[in-house]
Image: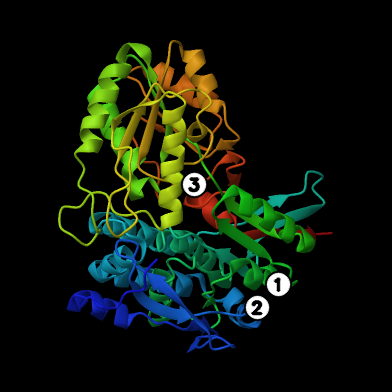
Amino acid sequence: MSTRADRIRPAAEQAVLDAVPKQLYVAGEWRDGAGGATFAVEDPATGEQIARVADATPQDALDALGAAHDAWRGDWRSSAPRERSDILRRAYEAIVARSDELALLMTLEMGKPLAESKAEIAYGASFLRWYAEEAVRSDGRFATHEAGTGRLLTMKQPVGPCVFITPWNFPLAMGTRKIAPAVAAGCTMLVKPAKLTPLSMLMLAQILEEAGLPGGVLNVVTASSSGSVMEPVIRDPRTRKLSFTGSTEVGRTLIGQSAEQVLRVSMELGGNAPFLVFDDADVDDAVAGAIVAKMRNIGEACTAANRFHVASSIAGEFADKLAAKMGAMKLGPGTQEGVEVGPLIDCEQRDKVAELVEDAVAKGARVLCGGEALDGPGNFYKPTVLIDVPADARLLKEEIFGPVAPIRTFESEDEAIAAANDTEFGLVAYLYSADLKRALRVGERLETGMVGVNQGLVSNAGAPFGGVKQSGIGREGGPEGIAEYLETKYLALAID
């Protein structure tokens, strides 16, 4: 990408960028990396450099882990639940109050339209509110021994220092989804945001600091090389929990590294979401849901509908209506008014999407709309609908992570379920049917951790987000989310 600096940036954009800390956040202090190096953050809509942030060394990461360990061994793990709750609530209120500023920052570094950035800010903030309420509700139990000779007491205690590695596609929400339950549970943490989108996380750290989170509880290290910086802390005995959101390939590597210290792990990995439309579905509702499931975040989401399986009797109508909707979506920089589809994160991702579409077309798929990158600067790819997609097309097996909807048909319920489950992934599925019995029957047979029934969005702070098979381990959100950060301790009490 270019690092042009010749364009005069609007004052509002520059003010937001100037307000973001650019250093590492360790032990409650903002500081440069040990080597003094920095790396560039670029606007995917233009290729322009918008900031330079500190480039951490492995020693910086170990220092941050040490700060987290010291804070946990100090007062934080025994801090009052109400204190932790109040901090999270203040942070929630601050994010809501600054949502316009945070949304603009997110759009500048990630590319999504401002309306979507605002939606992510609200979603990300909701985890702070949810876990502010959960912080005071981590209960144990008291029971009588079956022989009557003693009592059983169980309690919940924080796991300890956690290491979080977050992705670029939801740069704030993927942070709050991990940080909020960890804070509520009494854990401390080291966070390494994606190198492509570190600014939202740095601003979140500043907000939590201002909300009263003690130094060392949250530590943030930005780095251009994730593997070399994070491997030493994953293998360090002071780390007790690892949570990662990203690709399955990287997740497998991290699980292997975590085995050395027998860490508790949460892995939210790749997806290949099927979108099933049965012959009794309302086609217009299904198309509306498909737009949400496919085009949220420009298709760059692990929950994005990746394969559309439509009953043959309505497939033509569904495809034509979906192509009309997607083909009419306005493409451009996310900061421009009315834009519905922003750029992909970088040129590598744009080229991958193009390659997957070209492979499908070469094997016989037909393009109803889109099917090409946009000329000019930025990483834009036109919203695309493909029909007659052959079974051996790569995009049916690989995560597209872009605005492309491949459509295949089915004749029976069993055929639809078999096609949906024909993948190593199992994060989410979507199904549209007017028959509640069918929806329940199919939903139970789908090999995924989540199912959207007659809706194209499943994300909710109060619900357990996560997958099965090679889509991950563990859950984020809801009561299940805080359980990932709590150990159960049992005390056997003699009474005689």
* Spot occupied by residue 81 in the image (x, y as percentages of width and height): 50, 70
Foreground: 198 or 429?
A: 198
Depth order, front residue of 296/2: 2
- Picture coordinates of residue 330 (x, y %)? 20, 47
In this view, which residue lies farthest toward the left?
A: 337
Q: Kindly report the distance in space between the C-alpha atoms of the residues bearing marks 2 and 1.
A: 7 Å
For residue 271, the mark is none
Q: Position of residue 246 (x, y in %)?
A: 54, 54
> In terms of sequence position, does the residue under pointer 2 or pointer 3 come before the other?
2
Q: Amino acid at mark 2?
A: Pro
Q: Is residue 274 above or below residue 332?
A: above
User: What's the mark number on residue 232?
Assistant: 1
Q: Residue beneath label 3, please?
A: 465
Amino acid at dot 3 = Phe
Name the amino acid, label 1. Pro
Q: Residue at x 26, y 31 (%)?
A: 323
Which of the pair 416/356 is nearer the observer?
356
Mark 2 secondary-structure assignment? helix
**Mark found first going from the N terminus, 2 or 1:** 2
Looking at the rendered structure, the secondary structure element under dot 1 is helix
Q: Which residue is mark 2?
A: 58
The answer to whether mark 2 and mark 1 are in CB contact below 8 A is: yes
Question: Does label 1 or label 3 sit earlier along the sequence?
Answer: 1
